Image (tube, grey):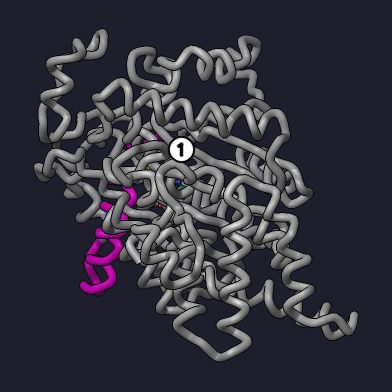
């Protein structure tokens, strides 16, 4: 057991997140277990991106298997390697392809969350642009050229890319704002980059450009951004998209296929190496990948490119393909996880442990009797209950752990992911038969805690990324 101390604020934040069933925003290293092979695979992707290449992964795992946690981890590793990261959850209002503003909305969410090592919690756009400017100013000083000239030269590389001319103009506008102390010009430039202008007229009035980031330019803008962050001294851009199951849930075949086509475009670009310094990580449930009616496999070109290596069966693994299966946590991983939680709750002081090792095994036995083996595979509820148990022990000194363990009430995880969107249910029932082998789905589900949730499927993880 490590002797690391954990700051009280970090301790509280970790425990609070776990009790709510979400992934802690910081300090995940204190609870993280397992996943060594998966991390190694992602490290090679990150290094390839940092080396000017491209990468793409589909992280596939059951509900509660740790996808969101894994994405957080990968992001923090990427930031360590000087990549810029952007991340967002897909939702009915945030898609990769759309005509009603949902792709711009995804873009805006990604850009709100833009992070660097110095600003790991998002909101890093201004500081990235500032960094670009200050590198250019240093070069101008060294070379004796005018700053404006150096900046224009540096931006020239963008102009040949789709949409690059206006992108470069916006950066130049930021520079003018910087140079003349015009804060509102700087702010408008950042707003444009973040996809926050909703009309061309406004953008033109504020910045003199004719275009804005919209649904149609979503992917081009991400490519431009990956090029730009390199000009600002970072090693590349990593895009993390969680809750991809929301595409599977789109009842309208045309909008679903529009999104899958966008994924195919990204997949082809990254596999052919026609994009630079750019990586994508998508995460979703097995249905999102495998369902041949509504999942990625319903799109023939994706199915053939994402088909799993037929030799990698019976315990053999292949971590080189684009699909990364997140294995379930093992019993040993889970035991280790409980020791970590105990350690965190004690703020890193073994003398303050609230339960002995015996208590950990007793807890596992109890869970296994209550919900079977699922308890360690999809650990959300089990973690919650264990943290609750520790909280009671802490606040009631002298209480006997053994008497409490037997009373822990634990429920099996229910997966809210498979509910169709409520507003599309009509379309769903009139256009398509229910997926094979599945009974028609109700409009509302139950959350992992058993509470009824409104019809969007109760994606409790949404809370994770609200800033
Ligand atoms: N490798 C891990 N080590 C420690 N805790 C984990 C790990 N993976 C997941 N968890 C915890 O398990 C719970 C469920 O994980 P989550 O990432 O939300 O699952 P998913 O996104 O697949 O539904 C969260 O509380 C998370 O903190
Ligand atoms: Mg998740």
Is residue 408 found left or right of 54 in the rendered image?
left
Is residue 193 found left or right of 342 in the rendered image?
right
Q: Residues within 10 Å of mark 1 (few under 14, many from 20)?
A: many
**Over which residues does the magenta segment extend?**
375-400
What x and y, as percent, mark residue 252? 26, 24
Give the residue furthest to the right.
143
What x and y, as percent, mark residue 207? 49, 70
- Residue of label 1: 283
Q: Secondary structure at mark 1?
A: strand
Whether the residue carrying mark 1 lies under 8 Å from ligand 2 is answered with yes
Q: Nearer the viewer, residue 245 or 391?
A: 245
> Can residue 376 be seen?
no
Residue drawn where x is 20% and y is 55% of the image: 403
Quarter of the image with the N terminus is: bottom right
Q: Nearer the viewer, residue 217 or 372?
A: 217
Quarter of the image with the C terminus is: bottom left
Residue 314, compared with residue 453, is above or below; it is above
């Amino acid at each position: 057991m490590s002797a690391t101390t954990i700051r009280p604020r970090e301790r509280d934040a970790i425990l609070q997140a776990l009790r709510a069933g979400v992934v802690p925003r910081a300090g995940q290293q204190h609870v993280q277990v397992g996943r060594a092979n998966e991390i190694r695979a992602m490290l090679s992707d990150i290094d390839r991106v940092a080396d000017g290449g491209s990468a793409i992964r589909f992280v596939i795992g059951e509900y509660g298997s740790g996808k969101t946690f894994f994405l957080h981890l990968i992001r923090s590793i990427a930031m360590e390697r000087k990549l810029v990261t952007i991340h967002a959850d897909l939702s009915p209002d945030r898609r990769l392809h759309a005509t009603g503003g949902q792709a711009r909305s995804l873009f805006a969410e990604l850009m709100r969350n833009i992070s660097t090592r110095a600003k790991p919690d998002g909101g890093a756009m201004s500081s990235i642009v500032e960094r670009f400017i200050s590198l250019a100013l240093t070069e101008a000083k060294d070379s004796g050229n005018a700053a404006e000239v150096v900046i224009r030269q540096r931006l020239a590389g963008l102009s040949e890319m789709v949409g690059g001319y206006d992108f470069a103009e916006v950066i130049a506008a930021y520079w003018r704002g910087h140079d003349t102390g015009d804060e509102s010009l700087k702010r408008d430039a950042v707003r444009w980059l973040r996809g926050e202008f909703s009309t061309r007229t406004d953008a033109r009035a504020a910045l003199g450009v004719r275009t804005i980031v919209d649904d149609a330019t979503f992917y081009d803008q991400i490519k431009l951004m990956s090029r730009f962050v390199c000009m600002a001294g970072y090693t590349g851009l990593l895009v993390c998209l969680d809750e991809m199951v929301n595409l599977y849930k789109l009842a309208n075949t045309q909008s679903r296929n529009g999104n899958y086509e966008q994924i195919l475009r990204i997949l082809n670009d990254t596999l052919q190496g026609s994009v630079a310094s750019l990586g994508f990580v998508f995460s979703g449930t097995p249905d999102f990948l495998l369902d041949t009616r509504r999942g990625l496999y319903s799109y023939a070109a994706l199915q053939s490119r994402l088909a799993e290596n037929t030799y990698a069966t019976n315990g053999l693994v292949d971590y080189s393909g684009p699909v990364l299966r997140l294995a379930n946590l093992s019993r040993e991983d889970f035991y280790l996880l409980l020791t970590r939680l105990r350690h965190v709750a004690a703020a890193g002081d073994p003398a303050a442990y609230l339960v002995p090792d015996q208590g950990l095994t007793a807890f596992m036995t109890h869970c296994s009797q209550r919900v079977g083996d699922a308890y360690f595979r999809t650990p959300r509820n089990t973690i919650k209950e264990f943290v609750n148990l520790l909280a009671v022990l802490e606040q009631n000194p002298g209480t006997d752990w053994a008497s409490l363990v037997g009373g822990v009430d634990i429920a099996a995880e229910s997966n809210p992911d498979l509910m169709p969107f409520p507003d599309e249910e009509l379309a769903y029932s009139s256009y398509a038969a229910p997926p094979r082998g599945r009974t028609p789905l109700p409009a509302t589900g139950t959350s992992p805690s058993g509470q009824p949730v409104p019809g969007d499927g109760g994606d409790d993880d949404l809370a994770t990324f609200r800033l």
